[in-house]
Amino acid sequence: MAELTGTRSPTATLDAATLAKDFPLLTREIHGRPITYLDSAASSQRPTAVLDAMRNYDETTHANVHRGVYTIAEEATRRFEAARTNVGRFIGAPDPGREVVFTKNATEALNLVAHTWGRTHLGRGDVVVLTEMEHHANIVPWHMLAAERGIELRWIPIDDDGQLVLDDLDAVLDGAKLLGVTCMSNVLGTLNPITELAAAAHAAGAVVLADACQSVPHLPTDVASLGVDFLAFSAHKMLGPTGIGVLWGREELLAELPPFLGGGEMILDVRKDGFTPNDIPWRFEAGTPPITEAIGLGAAVDYLRAVGMDAVRAHEISLTAYALDALNERFGDGIRIFGPSDAEARGGVLSFALGEVHPHDISQILDQYGVCVRAGHHCAKPLMRRLGVNSTARASFALYNDERDVDTLVEALDEAKKFFA
Amino acid sequence: MPGLEDLYREIILDHYRSPRNRGELETPPAVRVEGFNPLCGDEIVVTIDVQDGVLADIKIAGTGCSISQSSASMMSAAVKGKSVAEARDLIATFKGMMSIHEATLPSGAGDAGTIEETEPEAIDIDALGELAALQGVVKFPVRIKCATLSWNTLAQGLDEAASPV
């Protein structure tokens, strides 16, 4: 799993406290205390550079794209397409101008694959393989396709350390047409061995759809070395705005797919007796796209690139290790932390159960201390059932978090525990 | 800004730590209904035994946060032995206490919608007894669904008991 662990490089460093100053929201106080934002796995905060880029575009350049021949329309189109290329380069896309599809979010990106690739390649009895740790967004579209055309879903199980069980991988993949797998669990933090899985899937004749929502914001990503065929992620978890997601697809696979939604932009010609679809990627982008949001995503990519993804990963390994130690030291057997115990094998996502205290109650008490964590099933109910819980509390890190945030979390959790003792 | 004491009143914590009427009744004759809170994945199971228009027995099972569990516990104590009509009145009153803010929330599963909205000024808080302790929940809008989960589930159970399939 070398390609996803992004092991610490000795020269890669960042100063979280300095970076945090770039994020206006992080100056807020909650109930009279400085905010401790630990929910970046749900949605990250945005730096001034992203907010300014969007505002600058809106104030100086906005027009619809791919339509007007006047100056600002051409500028808008150029900036929009430059954002696409920039995002593609960030993930190592061989042909960024053709392989990056903008969607409204990662959920839509995954649905796009189920809708277009799924409907042209899957029929009754065909097999789609998923993992027990998938987000609902990479489960429900396949359930819908199963209900519509009788495909079979198979599941790669997880072990008690939150790692995929790959002993029977070849048998599970036998005859499969598609493997849908998350690069990093949004609950367990587990980094999956994508290169190995993709190679096994390809050997079995299956294409690979990777959900990279949690990995692209936190570690270096290179689609070529991952070996996947489709990769989905969203802007708002990587310091960008809501309202835009990305589907990267291998050029030759995208080129043979039918359109997704119908409308403007996605056509070359429309007649009374039919239409001719546009070239990729616009074939999949019916209607006016999220232009300002694409500009914002491009700025978020610039920000991450300037910090350096190796540095981001090294920082988050270090912070995760610190948090695992601090939580285990303070609460011992009183806390159950889900997922891999080795910080290098996981991302900065810590789901936990604190004794009998319900995650809702934990989150409520933590809020009084300005600490923002997520409580719930994290859109991963099959995984919750596997873990034997209805919900968990989850703290997740980004490049603006540091050890003081972890210390505040630990103290607030101690208060929650006392409150419900 | 409301403080935690508004939400976590002592009586609520008492019912959370020592829930009343836990378990499930045998079905049949009892009616069993499940309620879900899609926000947090909590599940509640209400079994009721209705005889001659009286809610003779009620048991609560499932898991949830302190607010949903204490609300369910207090509800079970309040409606046990009451007539179905009295239980429905209490549901309407309780939901009325919670509805001021609930109406502004997105609806989800578990909201049976069989209870008429009651004007806030028409609510007789005194009739709620210790349940009035849950009034503070309305200051924490995301928790209202926790407090009303068991009540919506009971309402559904009473409907099913009234018209057996």
Image (cartoon, grey):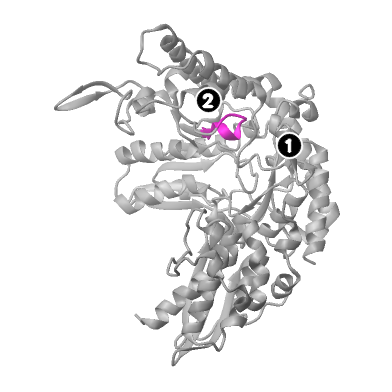
In the image as oriented, which residue stretches furthest toward the left? A273
**Span highlighted in magenta in the image:** A233-241
**Frontmost residue, B22 versus B73:** B73
Residue A237 visible, this orientation: yes
Of marks 2 and 1, which one's residue comes earlier in the chain? 1
Write the residue at 73% across / 32% down. Answer: A400
| Left or right for A266, reference B47 | left
Say which mark, if any, is on residue A28.
Answer: 1
Q: Which quadrant: the C terminus of chain A? A: bottom right
Residue A76 locus on image (x, y percent): 46, 14
Mark 2 residue element:
helix
Residue at 61%, 76% (x, y): give it: B128
Name the image quarter holding the N terminus of chain A: top right
Distance from disc 2 to disc 1, alpha carbons, whole Å, reads 41 Å
In the foreground, A40 or B115: B115
Q: Residue at x 77, y 65 (%)?
A: A420
Check the image and name the residue furthest to the right: A329
